[in-house]
Image (tube, coloured by chain):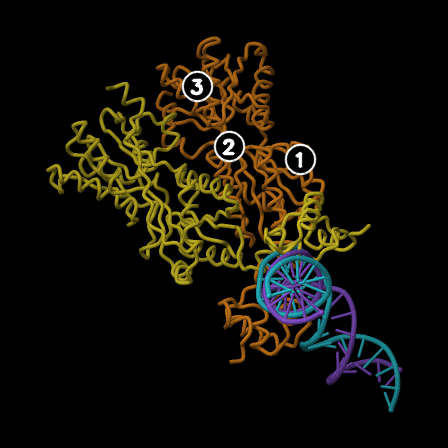
Chain colours: A orange, B yellow, C cyan, D purple
Amino acid sequence: MKTRAARAHHGSVSLTTVAEDTGVSISTVSRIVNGESGRASPETVARVEEAIARLGYRPNPVGRALRQRASRVVAMLSPNLDNPAMAAIAVSTEAALRAAGYVMILCDTHDRAELQDDYLQAMREQFVAGYVMVSAVRSRGLEETLRRGDPMVFVARHNPLGGGAYVGIDNRAAGADAADFMLARGIERPAVLMAAQNVSSTQERASGFIDRLVAHGIPDNAIRRASGPGLSHIEIGYAAAKALVQQGGWPEGALCVSDMIAYGAYRLAIESNVQIPQRCMLVGVDGNALNHWIAPWLTSIRIPYESFGGHVVAQLESLWSGEPTSEVRIPHEPPMVGLAQKATA
Amino acid sequence: MKTRAARAHHGSVSLTTVAEDTGVSISTVSRIVNGESGRASPETVARVEEAIARLGYRPNPVGRALRQRASRVVAMLSPNLDNPAMAAIAVSTEAALRAAGYVMILCDTHDRAELQDDYLQAMREQFVAGYVMVSAVRSRGLEETLRRGDPMVFVARHNPLGGGAYVGIDNRAAGADAADFMLARGIERPAVLMAAQNVSSTQERASGFIDRLVAHGIPDNAIRRASGPGLSHIEIGYAAAKALVQQGGWPEGALCVSDMIAYGAYRLAIESNVQIPQRCMLVGVDGNALNHWIAPWLTSIRIPYESFGGHVVAQLESLWSGEPTSEVRIPHEPPMVGLAQKATA
DNA sequence: ATCATTTAGGCAAACGTTTGCCTAACTTGT
DNA sequence: ACAAGTTAGGCAAACGTTTGCCTAAATGAT
């Protein structure tokens, strides 16, 4: 009957519970919990630790957050989780954060600046330890958060305001690799399908592709480009392919700046009875896990999203310890041909 | 220069800031913020509201959570987000919770009981308002949480301990619909591909399918079943299809208890040069959005995951207000045939 | 023996809320 | 005029932490 306070009301065990149980003050318990050495005698430490184990005490993150104005929660803001690439990034980051003792809170911004701002604000009020911005868009809240100096890592798309910690691939190089791949297969007049929106990452893939082709002597104006509007990349791909074909028929090959765009183009090919990859070779970027199973017609440059999480956490830890962060460019894999293409070869 | 406390140190605006600005006590400000009527004169209310707007005060969720032992955060525990169906549920629930003024925190349990328990514990310490369990597995922590009476909604898979609020489709009926569909196409000896693990939802689809076939006079032992081990449904599908084929060749048609399983089976079909759906009609369940674009060979029973979120929130609100909750069975859509099949017909 | 330093640990404020209780001042009824 | 009731709002405790400062005792140095 020594513990009568806190414990009685609700089932939770707090510092007070442990303090009362062992007869020391809550300060002492707190210091022991936090491993502050030289503040308590070894016997006291032992007694308190025993009580902690026996009562099952765990520090309450909310009380801690309030006091320290900092929590062990990290916010990830991501546009459409529907996109498997985004989901893969979320999964890997979540696991890495968990391993580092953090909890991730995932916010779907639908690529809209206002929602992004709403979430930035809400997360700040939760005293989150940092922000992981997947394909962030420019917004007022983003500027404010950066100006405040809050830890923020950009993933897949660079900070729209320039600078900042970044984790992603070298998009220009990926585009160049796609060009080399096509040239090696004798495709001299490839096209490129992209989004109408001017998004840095996919834009870079396209220009890396085009620049490499030009470097190989292909005239710039011989490289047909098409873009499409739409909410999702998949719809964009369909629309872009349609525009391209109407403008001058199917090309021998096309770079699709994301796998989703390739999927959209594929649908048009089915509708038009065009054989992929025999009649038109599509090269995507992402390396979606589903390709192996249901898209054997697609060649894709795989991005190792499953390894992003570790790098994101490393970047955050740099920011937390005040070290300077640099851009982390993760190597992408060479174009991987699907079964359909191997069969043809 | 009237505000000198809180404001000065960090940029945040608290009740104290507003109170000092207007010259009232923080209690009064708090009550006005919370719309408690009849506690302040209209003029005071106006003055305080003006200050709130001018200073941009927003109640701090952490302080609030600590005091009330309750927050406006809802935890969703989901196995593998890689699965597009799970991602779709997450997206829709996130949007619905947001609309209701809640923030969702998404935890990936990888279908492992220990991780589920870790997260349940961590979330409880965050004073979450409720739990959304997508395809939950049986675990000690789950039992405890339920015993404690915490608000919990099960999605897609029933509470492994029985009872509880549920949102999902009628899986048996979906299986039966698949059977009718095949029978109508003259497929008299369909097979069924499922997971080896005994998971209620997909198990129900399979038995609904089989029971309907039996009801139509097909002998039970003529319905070939195959299951496969594996981490993901897609690998399970591949393995199950392989087992089925080795055992007695390709069937005319097969129910795949999820689209992912159908994808796995499709890979085997490509490798074996078997035409889908001409040689073997695959019927999946989920209605993955990608089907329309890259899996025209698949017929799928669509589950309207995008509408799950609203029902989940409604269930939670019932739980919060103490009303009894009942199972919500959302109607699935009839089998939707892909382009490849339409072309043949 | 005196003084300085270390050891061990407690007190209380602070983080931002909410809320039970208290109390002036005012209004109303008779 | 006076009791009763209402209105308007303040005080302070509590939620669970952390941490600067304080102090009593013990130890060590001279």
Query: Of helix, strand and loop, which one carries label 2?
Result: loop
Which mark lies nearer to you, 1 or 2?
A: 1
Q: Earlier in the sequence, mark 1 or mark 3?
A: 1
Q: Do the numbered discs 3 and 2 sit on residues whose CB atoms are within 8 Å?
A: no
Residue B93 lies in quadrant = top left
Report crowding for label 2: few under 14, some 14 to 19, many 20 or more residues within 10 A (C-alpha): some
**Residue in front for this viewpoint, A42 or B22:** B22
Q: Same chain, marks 1 and 2? A: yes
> Does the image show residue A32?
no
Q: Relative to residue B314, is residue A178 depicted above or below?
A: above
Report crowding for label 1: few under 14, some 14 to 19, many 20 or more residues within 10 A (C-alpha): few
Which residue has dot 1 on it?
Answer: A140
| Horizontal side, residue A32 vs residue A246: left or right | right
* Amino acid at pointer 2: Glu
The alpha-carbon separation of the residues under discs 1 and 2 comes to: 36 Å
Q: Earlier in the sequence, mark 3 or mark 2?
A: 3
The residue at the point 39 percent across, 30 percent down is B290
Q: Callout 3: residue from which chain?
A: A
Which residue has dot 3 on it?
Answer: A281
